[in-house]
Image (spheres, rainbow, N blue to C red):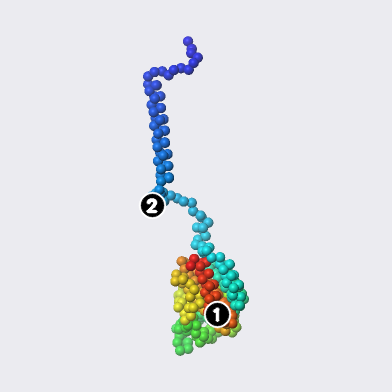
Amino acid sequence: MKTTGPQRPARGHGSGSTRARLLLVWAATVLVLFAAASVAVVRTGPAPATGFLALEWQPRDQSEEAAGPQPSAAVDLDTEISRILSENGGYRIGVVLADTQGGAPQAYGDVSPYVAASTAKIITAAAYYHLVETGEKTLDAPMGDFDVSFQLKTMVNNSSNDSWLLLMEDIGYPQLIAYAASIGISYDPEQNLVTPAEMTLLLKQLSSGKLLNAEHTGELLGHMQQTNNERLIPAAVGPDVTVHHKYGELEGYVHDAAILSSGGRSYALTIYTWGEDAGSEARLGVIHELTRKVTESLFGR
């Protein structure tokens, strides 16, 4: 005889199995609810000072990482330099800045040729060291009352015109012109005209070791520190910025050309100026203000 309705489960172990399954489901539900509550407590509780949550992976901005250290955005350098130039229209001013490790230079103001004054002594120094490296000259050869090494140091560190003349005559003007051309500078020592961009290029090549070997690079840079005139670019930088520079002052021209280094970065900065007031406090103030804006932008100080 068939039945047409649902069948009742058989008594015995089948009924016990059903109750066991219900108990397991109930226990699992309780465990899930407990775990969820525990996670909520951890997520919303106070962050531990040094717990594992502080070490969780966070997404990183890969574009910033690839770009490396960036100059401070606190100073809009183009705007600031343009403002300084416009506020000092009575002077002829040319500013060129370049990263010594590469990239196009930034130029501001009048960057046509200037009488380079004593900044061009770096061209003569580099040319002479180059001749030493090619074996045509030696640093211990007699020159004047001393030797070549002494004259190089005195020319750069004390800006001696006598030493400059001795060194240029020993090199020979045609050879000096040819050397300058070989490093990208159009230079005639009798006219002594250089653009701010050419001087910046010279400093960039010197700093990066492209002009001279390591020994002579270090020696020349050493002569460019603690010179007999530190009142231009060096006077406007902080103690954590290293300056190697060569100044020049002559008949209304007041210049400084420097390598600025800090935190593993270095830049070549040339500031050329001309005006009727020569080395006045006002002229120094312009050079100082330009230098401060550059260092604030590049190094954040």
Does residue 217 show up? no
User: Which residue is at a point 51% across and 71% down the rendered structure image?
Assistant: 292
- The disc at residue 49 is 2
- The disc at residue 254 is 1
Which of the 4 image quarters holds residue 273? bottom right
Pick the front one: 287 or 107: 287
Task: Tell whether label 2 touches label 1 (CB within 8 Å).
Answer: no
Pick the front one: 116 or 254: 254
User: Which residue is at a point 59% across and 75% down the rendered structure image?
Assistant: 88
- The disc at residue 164 is none
Does residue 260 show up? yes
User: Which residue is at a point 38% across and 52% down the rendered structure image?
Assistant: 49
Question: Which amino acid is tagged 1?
Answer: Val
Q: Residues within 10 Å of mark 2 (few under 14, many from 20)?
A: few
- Give the structural element (helix, strand or loop) at label 2: loop
Q: Residue 249's spot in the image, x, y percent?
A: 54, 82
Q: Earlier in the sequence, mark 1 or mark 2?
A: 2
Disc 1 to disc 2, C-alpha distance: 57 Å
Q: Residues within 10 Å of mark 1 (few under 14, many from 20)?
A: many
Pick the front one: 35 or 269: 35
Q: Residue 65's spot in the image, x, y percent?
A: 50, 58
Residue that protrudes farthest toward the top in the picture: 1
Which of the 4 image quarters holds residue 43? top left
